[in-house]
Image (tube, rainbow, N blue to C red):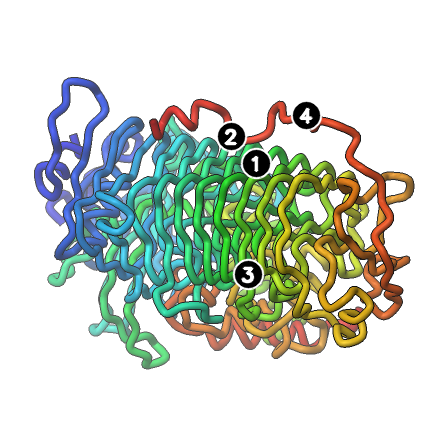
């Protein structure tokens, strides 16, 4: 708030240091109210990652004079100097509290992921490389111990073939309307082919059960459960584009699930959600069993329901 | 600059004339944040030195910097205590190369104890992983868990209570597992979908199965083989199987000494196999139906020679044991084979005079219903085994000298 209307601090985004404060970047004209600065554009994903029901404020910053490149239905190819900013909030209206802001910076040496923890006064967020825990009441009314990930845990989800990459802004999970705006403003070179394919989560009941569930698995699981990522050794590949039933877990036996498998034998048994390890782990709050392993301290009722409906209607093998 | 700031603020940094630093992290208040910060801010070549005492942790720890040593004051002195863990799938996760972990303990992690994934040339030395409540299904799966790595040395470690394998090396190559003690786990030591592994001079006891060498279908890395299991004490592995049913090790019979499933070129030699009540050595094909065309479910060229067998097969956990035991004079012979093999390639080659028997199954993945037990009739080993390229590279030894 001390530097209203100043341009985004490109030297902080692209530099080698780990800025201590979120305000150092000048991404916001009004930090506390999350009013973005010039060049910082809010966006949403059709089907987002669920994080204990947190409200998420997403922004993308592409430096002046540069633009992102369309690359089919996949991730937009962002130029050096890009920042993806995501603030996590709980509570409505005047009760809303900002908890953490995660930034993903595209530096000349590669993407860097950093977590910032908001202060009690809600005036600033400070770098917390080791993460944190704090008590939160979720929108579902549950009291949880909310986990702010540490810097390494950022990479557990954002790591692909040993480098950090963005996860969310894939053309297939972004609205055509938003992408059009980005093209018009010159921040994106062209409308990507295959944009806006994943269903909008709030309208999922209008979508076929398999698309809603597959979109959820893509957004919530596939950053680890895919080749080259953290859970690659499981052999489970939950990406949207995967069409091999076995890779998707259908009649696939677990590999190293340990007690995460419960008493169950297969990841997904068509027609039998309660005998499917995938759903069992989604429905567990217990560390060592719960999936996703990070960023979840409670159960996503909507997500588990979508996956349940998908498994119920899968044809028997 | 940031690094120096943190060091003066939160950690005790020991000045050193060389670039590598030792970052000391004492036990005590706020261990989670202090230790995790040290692991994040360490630079290649640094040592993060744990003080003596108990580190009470609420979340998984992780290390993603190459060439770091995490060292404690001894496996009974520096304890990372995860009894109060609230998140993450393991106690400590390592994702960088050339890391050395030594002289500390991990207790009661909710998932695996220590996992290193895609972490080449990792050394685990005198590390202890314990679930202190004894064998329980609710214990974490693996104690020491290197996976998807080239270059693994696990030496002098101690694991107790893993609900899957105490020491599990998966989808890796150039591996040495030696001088370890594993007890009260479902599997003592497991080498899975891995190549060029030496498992030697370990003591595995009171597990469900002592040492397992597996190759499974549908994994990113397959084609396990070139595994030498030599000079181990495999004694009294008689703990009832407590693995959750969905896991492959849930099928391991209580009282199995060494079990080879699929794989090519395996040597089981010069081990002491004592008091394993189902079988001292078991060699079988993959037991389930599968559809992965890249996969060979049969054991090939498994050499069994020079082992010492004492008191085995007297209480086998095998259907029809009551009928089988009298057939073989009260206890089953030391070596059990399911009878399945890959065409003309011998499944196993056994030193003449070794007591053995075969189930004489005729088709893979169809269960044991068709078993027609009979004596073991297989060829003998052809001669010396080529040890070149087996085991971790000598550079890994240098780090613990």
Observer-side mark, 3 or 4, equals: 3
Q: Distance between the Cα atoms at labels 3 and 4?
A: 30 Å
Lower position in the chain sequence, tag 3 or tag 4:
3
* Element under disc 3: loop
Position of the C terminus of chain A, as image quadrant, is bottom right
Q: Chain of mark 4?
A: B
* Element under disc 2: loop
| Residue B88: image location, x then y, percent | 39, 58
Say if residue B94 shows up in the picture: yes
Q: Are marks 4 and 2 on the same chain?
A: yes
Quadrant hosting residue B10: top left
| Residue A229: image location, x then y, percent | 52, 45
- At 38% across and 24% down in the image, what residue appears? B398
Up the image or down, B247 lies above or below B158; here it is below
* Residue, disc 4: B386
Q: Nearer the viewer, residue A250 or B136?
A: B136
Q: Distance between the Cα atoms at labels 1 and 4?
A: 12 Å
Q: Are marks 1 and 4 on the same chain?
A: yes
Observer-side mark, 3 or 1, equals: 3
Q: Nearer the viewer, residue A234 or B258?
A: B258
Lower position in the chain sequence, tag 2 or tag 3:
3
Q: Chain of mark 1?
A: B
Up the image or down, A267 lies above or below B148; here it is below
* Residue, disc 3: B237
Q: Distance between the Cα atoms at labels 2 and 3?
A: 27 Å
Q: Distance between the Cα atoms at labels 4 and 2?
A: 15 Å
Q: Distance between the Cα atoms at labels 1 and 2?
A: 8 Å
Check whether the beta carbons of the residues at disc 1 and disc 2 lie within 8 A of each other. yes
> Mark number for residue A204?
none
Up the image or down, A133 lies above or below A151; here it is below
Lower position in the chain sequence, tag 4 or tag 2:
4
* Residue, disc 1: B198
């Amino acid at each position: 708030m001390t530097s209203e209307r100043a341009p985004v601090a490109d030297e902080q985004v692209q530099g080698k240091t780990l800025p201590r404060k979120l305000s150092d970047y000048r991404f916001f004209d009004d930090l506390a109210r999350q009013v973005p600065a010039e060049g910082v554009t809010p966006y949403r994903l059709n089907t987002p990652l669920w994080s204990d029901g947190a409200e998420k404020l997403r922004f993308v910053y592409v430096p002046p004079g540069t633009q992102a490149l369309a690359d089919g239905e996949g991730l937009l190819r962002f130029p050096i100097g890009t920042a993806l900013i995501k603030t996590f909030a709980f509570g409505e209206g005047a009760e809303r509290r900002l908890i953490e802001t995660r930034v993903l910076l595209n530096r000349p040496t590669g993407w860097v992921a950093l977590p910032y923890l908001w202060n009690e006064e809600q005036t600033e967020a400070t770098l917390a490389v080791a993460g944190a825990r704090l008590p939160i009441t979720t929108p579902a009314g549950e009291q949880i111990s909310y986990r702010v990930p540490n810097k390494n845990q950022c990479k557990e989800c954002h790591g692909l073939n040993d480098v950090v990459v963005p996860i969310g802004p894939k053309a297939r999970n972004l609205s055509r309307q938003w992408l059009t705006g980005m093209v018009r403003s010159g921040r994106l070179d062209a409308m990507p082919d295959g944009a806006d394919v994943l269903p909008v989560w709030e309208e999922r009941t209008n979508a076929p059960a398999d698309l809603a569930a597959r979109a959820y698995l893509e957004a919530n699981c596939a950053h680890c459960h895919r080749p080259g990522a953290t859970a690659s050794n499981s052999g489970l590949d939950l990406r949207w584009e995967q069409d091999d039933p076995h890779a998707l877990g259908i009649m696939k036996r677990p590999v190293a699930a340990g007690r995460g498998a419960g008493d169950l034998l297969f990841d997904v048994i068509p027609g039998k959600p309660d005998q499917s390890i995938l759903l069992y782990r989604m429905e567990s709050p217990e560390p060592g069993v719960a999936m996703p392993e990070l960023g979840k301290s409670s159960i996503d009722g909507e997500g588990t329901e979508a996956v349940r409906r998908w498994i119920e209607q899968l044809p028997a093998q | 600059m940031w690094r120096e700031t943190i060091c003066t603020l939160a950690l005790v940094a020991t000045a050193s004339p060389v670039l590598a630093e030792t970052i000391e992290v004492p036990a005590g208040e706020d261990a989670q944040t202090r230790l995790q910060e040290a692991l994040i801010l360490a630079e290649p070549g640094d040592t993060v030195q744990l003080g003596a005492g108990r580190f009470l942790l609420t979340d998984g720890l992780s290390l993603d910097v190459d060439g770091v040593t995490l060292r404690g004051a001894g496996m009974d002195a520096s304890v990372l205590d995860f009894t109060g863990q609230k998140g993450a799938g393991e106690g400590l996760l390592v994702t960088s190369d050339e890391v050395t972990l030594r002289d500390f303990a991990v207790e009661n992690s909710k998932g695996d104890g220590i996992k290193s994934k895609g972490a080449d040339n990792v050394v685990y030395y005198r590390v202890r992983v314990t679930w202190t409540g004894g064998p329980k299904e609710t214990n974490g799966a693996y104690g020491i868990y290197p996976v998807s790595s080239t270059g693994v040395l696990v030496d002098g470690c101690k694991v107790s209570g893993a609900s899957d394998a105490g020491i599990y090396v998966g989808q890796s190559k150039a591996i040495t597992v030696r001088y370890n003690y594993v007890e009260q786990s479902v599997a003592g030591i497991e080498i899975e979908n891995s190549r060029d592994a030496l498992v030697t001079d370990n003591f595995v006891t009171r597990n469900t199965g002592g040492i397992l060498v597996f190759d499974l279908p549908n994994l990113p890395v397959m084609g396990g083989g070139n595994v030498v299991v030599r000079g181990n004490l495999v004694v009294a592995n008689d703990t009832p199987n407590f693995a959750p049913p969905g896991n492959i090790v849930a099928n391991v019979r209580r009282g199995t000494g060494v079990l080879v499933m699929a794989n090519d070129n395996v040597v089981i030699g010069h081990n002491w196999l004592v008091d394993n009540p189902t079988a001292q050595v078991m060699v079988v094909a993959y037991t389930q139906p599968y559809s992965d065309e890249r996969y060979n479910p049969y054991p090939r060229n498994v050499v069994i020679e020079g082992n010492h067998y004492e008191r085995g097969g007297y209480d086998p956990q095998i259907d029809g044991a009551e009928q089988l035991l009298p057939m073989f004079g009260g206890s089953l012979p030391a070596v059990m084979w399911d009878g399945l093999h890959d065409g003309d390639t011998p499944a196993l080659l056994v030193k003449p005079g070794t007591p053995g028997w075969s189930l004489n199954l005729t088709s893979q993945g169809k269960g044991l219903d068709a078993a027609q037990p009979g004596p073991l009739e297989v060829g003998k080993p052809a001669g010396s085994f080529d040890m070149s390229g087996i085991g971790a590279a000598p550079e890994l030894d240098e780090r613990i000298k």
